[in-house]
Image (cartoon, grey):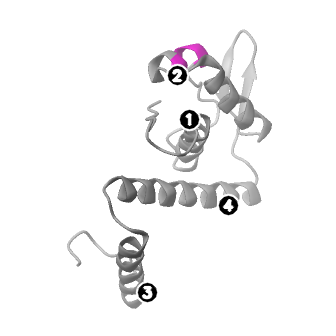
Amino acid sequence: MQIDINLTSKVPIYVQIIDQIKHMIATGDLRPDDQLTTVRKLATELRVNFNTVARAYRILDEEGLISTQHGRGTYILPHPSEENGERLRRQDLKWLTRHYLNEAALLGYSAEEVSTIINNYINLWEESGSPPTEHEN
């Protein structure tokens, strides 16, 4: 399980962990019954406080996405209902969008510059019926 933390982001670290685990569930990188890295090990790998990872896991547990079984580990729960699955897809799209916007901001782009480019690509997508390729300007 690969989680990358952006220490310069305004998004709290525990939220970054939650968002990335939700993204991995939504994309199928994490499947039902997959075991997550232990809280202690993930905290060590990310070089963050144990309580930060524990908070992220607790929230994911409360949302019904994971289950911690004392003495056995933490596991991804079976896929949520169709309604929850759609909610998870939307959350994943929001995560992708926030990630993109944060990266653009770190590179010094203004909201107006980003909006112009995104709108141009959305227009191309609507006109052609498929998302633009990397070769389309």
Given the current orientation, which residue lies at the most extreme right position? Answer: 62
Label 2, label 1: how many angstroms apart (C-alpha)?
Answer: 8 Å
Q: Quick check: 65 left or right of 34?
A: right
For label 4, the residue is 86
For label 3, the residue is 126
**Which residues, given as a range, are shown in magenta?**
38-43
Answer with mark 2 or mark 1, whichever residue precedes in sequence.
1
Q: Amino acid at mark 1?
A: Ile
Answer with mark 1 or mark 3, whichever residue precedes in sequence.
1
Answer with mark 3 or mark 4, whichever residue precedes in sequence.
4
Please state which of the two labelled residues, at mark 4 or mark 2, is closer to the viewer: 2
Residue 62, compared with residue 88, is above or below; it is above
Please state which of the two labelled residues, at mark 4 or mark 1, is closer to the viewer: 1
Instruction: Answer whether residue 125 is magenta in the image.
Output: no
Q: Amino acid at mark 3?
A: Glu
How many residues crowd mark 4 within 10 Å: few (<14), some (14–19), many (20+)? few
Q: Quick check: 72 left or right of 48?
A: right
**Callouts 1 and 3 close, C-beta under 8 Å:** no
Secondary structure under tag 4 reads helix
Q: Amino acid at mark 2?
A: Val
The spot of residue 128 in percent (x, y) is 36, 87
For label 1, the residue is 13
